[in-house]
Amino acid sequence: MADLNGALIGCGFFAVNQMHAWQDVAGAKIVAICDRDPQRLKIVGDQFGIERRYSDAAQMFADGGFDFVDIATTVQSHRALVEMAAAHKIPAICQKPFAKTLDDAKAMVKVCADADIPLMVHENFRWQTPIQHVKKVLEDGIVGDPFWGRFSFRSGYDVFSGQPYLAESERFIIEDLGIHTLDIARYILGDVTQLSARTRRINQSIKGEDVATILLDHGSGATSIVDVSYASKLSTEPFPETLIELDGTEGSIRLTQGYRLEVNGRNGTEVSDVSPRMLSWASRPWHNIQESVFAIQQHWADCLSVGGETSTSGADNLKTFALVEAAYESAASGQAVDIGSMLR
Ligand code: NAD
Ligand code: 89V
């Protein structure tokens, strides 16, 4: 079967990972790129040998010649670009955060459903190798039914040098990073019915919150904590590892720093190394994220060629995005927030 041809919009900091990953994906390749910043367009075009270059996404869609679009811009442009893709009936991948508001996200899902095109959110953290291992242990029933969990990302990494816009946003850690951790909590323990959140801003030179603690009630009856921080000064910097604790009716799982997985279950205690692969273009400490970028893009190419909904479809991501909105609402009001009513 011929390769799927893709176009990528937004040639910034993170798109370089996406472009590398597309080179490794079987069955898809990028044939056109777009960025309104001519310098970024040239850097990425030259690095990856892409001849078709656009400063205007509307012009690129009008010219066509591609089977899907990968939207790698920051959130402000997501709705307009997804709507443009739907208008041209082009299947779309959209980076996280999916939208500025839940209402925008719902509208984006609807416009793609109405146009009958697949829409996937580039929510890659659940595709990380260690997270996939945890999911498999649960699915194999080794620890029984999980009734409690903790999903933790605590770091002192300077995320602002690579992504300076993060220091300027009124909403920071929940919208940018907690969104991944909340998605992992949903992926592992199922959908959430209610949550409560508390936030803090420790780093006074940024605008948004950099610490959040979120208590989740899952529909399964499990309870979990999602805690995220960019203000944690640790002896060994764990960025960008998500650490997981799960207690089940028959055992427990601990994913600890250094990609160490300890499973205490029906077969006794087993410890394994679940480190991500170091792809040829990857670099530490980002290799965990970089491998998941390849994995989610391969998943997209596979689903697009044979059909079937992606794991992080737009519709699925509404349920993660609602948790982000709810966390801000709860932190502001001090009250628990019901998730079901937000999704109706
Ligand atoms: P960036 O600012 O470095 O890059 C964005 C690029 O998009 C810029 O070059 C800008 O000129 C271009 N752009 C913006 N609007 C445009 C438009 N309408 N048309 C054409 N070009 C446009 O941002 P970044 O750090 O690369 O982040 C991009 C997205 O990726 C963000 O949503 C961010 O949250 C997400 N991200 C995801 C991960 C992950 O692991 N999933 C990691 C980092 C960043
Ligand atoms: O995923 C992200 O958007 C990134 C990072 C992992 C560094 O938080 O900002």
Image (cartoon, grey):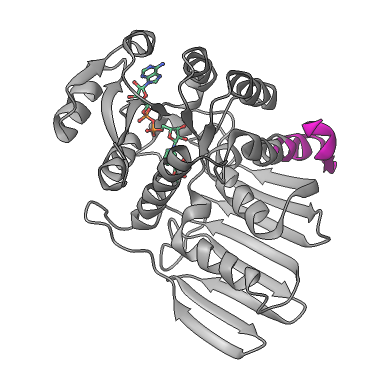
Q: Is residue 43 magenta?
A: no
Q: Quadrant of residue 207?
A: top right
Q: Residue at x 21, y 19 (%)?
A: 52
Query: Which of the pair 263/112 is nearer the observer?
Result: 112
| On screen, residue 219 above or below 172 | below
Query: Residue 135 location in percent, x, y?
Result: 59, 65
Q: Quadrant of the C terminus?
A: top right
Query: Residue 180 location in percent, x, y?
Result: 56, 47
Q: Quadrant of residue 102?
A: top right
On screen, residue 280 versus residue 302, left or right, reads: left
Q: Quadrant of residue 328?
A: top right
Q: Residue at x 63, y 49 (%)?
A: 182
Residue 231 visible in the snapshot: no
In which quadrant of this rendering is ligand 1 seen?
A: top left
Q: Is residue 338 magenta?
A: yes
| On screen, residue 240 above or below 321 | below
Region rendered in magenta: 326-344
Total marks shown come to: 0
Query: Which of the pair 43/166 is nearer the observer?
Result: 43
Q: Residue furthest front?
A: 1
Query: Residue 190 location in percent, x, y?
Result: 72, 55
On screen, residue 209 versus residue 37, left or right, reads: right
Query: Residue 186 location in percent, x, y?
Result: 67, 52
| On screen, residue 139 above or below 288 | below
Main secondary structure along the magenta-highlighted residues: helix
Q: Quadrant of the N terminus?
A: top left
Q: Residue at x 19, y 27 (%)?
A: 50
Residue 237 visible in the snapshot: yes
| On screen, residue 251 above or below 197 | below
Query: Which of the pair 70/242 is nearer the observer?
Result: 70
